């Protein structure tokens, strides 16, 4: 038996605090959807600080970036009165559920996860935490009975293993966990690197010129967009295979301006790439300016931010503890007298 359905279905998502600024891919692929969904869902948005430990990082960087990441959720429009914003490490049920799920995960299944395979193939000295990363992510989601998980396309495989683990648990122990649906928006599922538009925009991408950080100077952002790689054919139309650079610029424009891509193609008919880049730069800078302003205000008051995180963790723990208890009972652990 799952817990009684909440008044609104739940959603859950998170980002790793691995940088001092989110990038445009995080913003369009995830954060914008989080903001839209908080109206209709009981929403839980967390900073995946435990996941960030899978890569060796200076402790001071993790501390600073955890606050900065949470603040950017709010700067992007997540309302802390409506949605719980918290740090993963503040809600211990994530790791408690993870252990039980780890004991349901086949070694071969975890070995096949592409993130682990890619990182080890690129010569990263992988630790066991990186290997079990997807199981912690499954616990993050399942501990809230989340019906949907708004993420970019790169997280698809992680959601598949989450669904598999929930289904396996339910088959073995009876209906206990909610099997979540990914919530991936087509237009912004994969924002590409501006210099290498066949690779996703990412903080570990090949050059800083291909990455738009949300906290970059607006002038610098406009310059990066004006030097984005396109192609030689000169026609502005959406073709992600043949014209990945132009397609990426059209996706960014459409995701931010709300103008459907066919309408953009019609509007740019007969015009050059210079015009397209200028307009995309304008659209991005217009969206980023209020975000940066709000961010500066939030970082001025770290005490208030810590209060928000504490309230968020308390709200999250209530839900998470109920799931943890249910799962512990199902697998036969003797109930703790609390
Ligand atoms: P992370 O921190 O790499 O990315 C955060 C979110 O940004 C999306 N994203 C993109 N979307 C479109 N285009 C891009 N170029 C792009 N780059 C990143 C990601 O899909 C993600 O939604 N494993 C997760 C963090 C996590 C999590 C969770 C997410 C831990 N537990 C539970 C959801 C639910 C990660 O590393 O995201």
Image (cartoon, rainbow, N blue to C red):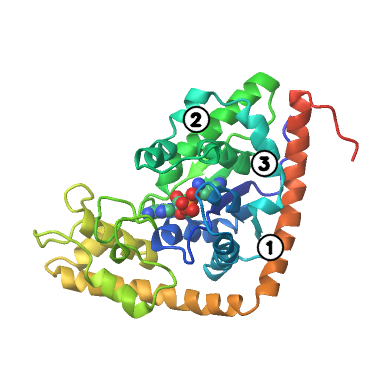
**Element under disc 3:** helix
Q: Which of the two discs, 3 and 2, labels the residue nearer the N terminus?
A: 3
Q: Residue at x 67, y 62 (%)?
A: 82
Say which label, 1 or 2, has the lower sequence index.
2
Viewport quadrant of the N terminus: top right
Q: Residue at x 76, y 33 (%)?
A: 326
Q: Earlier in the sequence, mark 3 or mark 1?
A: 3
Q: Nearer the viewer, mark 1 or mark 2?
A: 2
> 68 or 289: nearer the eye?
68
Residue behind mark 1: 309
Pointers 1 and 2 in contact (C-beta within 8 Å): no
Please name the residue that numbered disc 3 is placed on. Answer: 95
Disc 3 from disc 2: Cα separation: 17 Å
Q: Residue furthest right?
A: 337
Is 107 above or below relative to 277?
A: above
Quadrant housing residue 330: top right
| Residue on which the image places disc 2 | 110
Asked if disc 3 and disc 2 are in contact, CB closer than 8 Å, the reply is no
91 with respect to 246 (left or right): right
Where 130 falls versus 333 (above or below)? Answer: below
| 235 vs 18, nearest the viewer | 18
Q: CA distance from mark 1 to mark 2?
A: 31 Å
Residue 145 in view here:
yes
């Amino acid at each position: 038996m799952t817990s009684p359905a909440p008044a609104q279905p739940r959603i859950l998502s998170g980002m790793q605090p691995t940088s001092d600024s989110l990038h445009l891919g995080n913003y369009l692929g995830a954060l914008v959807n989080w903001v839209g969904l908080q109206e209709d869902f009981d929403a839980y948005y967390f900073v995946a600080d435990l996941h960030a430990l899978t890569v060796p990082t200076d402790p001071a960087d993790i501390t600073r970036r955890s606050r900065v990441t949470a603040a950017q959720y709010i700067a992007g429009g997540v309302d802390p009165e409506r949605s719980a914003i918290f740090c993963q490490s503040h809600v211990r049920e994530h790791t408690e559920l993870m252990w039980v799920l780890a004991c349901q995960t086949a070694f071969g299944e975890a070995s096949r996860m592409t993130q682990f395979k890619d990182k080890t193939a690129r010569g990263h000295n992988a630790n066991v935490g990186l290997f079990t990363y997807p199981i912690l992510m499954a616990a993050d989601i399942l501990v809230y009975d989340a019906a949907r998980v708004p993420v970019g396309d790169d997280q698809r495989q992680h959601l598949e293993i989450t669904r598999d683990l929930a289904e396996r648990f339910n088959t073995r122990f009876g209906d206990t966990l909610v099997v979540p649906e990914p919530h991936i928006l087509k237009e912004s599922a994969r924002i590409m690197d501006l210099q290498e538009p066949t690779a996703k925009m990412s903080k570990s991408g090949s050059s800083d010129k291909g990455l738009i950080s949300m906290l970059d100077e607006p002038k610098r952002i406009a310059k990066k967009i004006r030097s984005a790689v396109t192609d030689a054919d000169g026609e502005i139309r959406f073709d992600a295979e043949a014209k990945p650079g132009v397609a990426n610029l059209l996706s960014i424009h459409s995701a931010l301006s709300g103008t459907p891509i066919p309408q953009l193609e019609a509007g740019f008919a007969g015009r050059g790439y210079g015009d397209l880049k200028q307009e995309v730069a304008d659209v991005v800078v217009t969206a980023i300016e209020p975000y940066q302003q709000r961010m500066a205000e939030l970082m001025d008051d770290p005490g208030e931010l810590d209060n928000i995180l504490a309230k968020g963790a308390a709200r999250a723990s209530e839900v998470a503890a109920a799931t943890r208890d249910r799962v512990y009972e199902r697998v036969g652990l003797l109930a703790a007298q609390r």
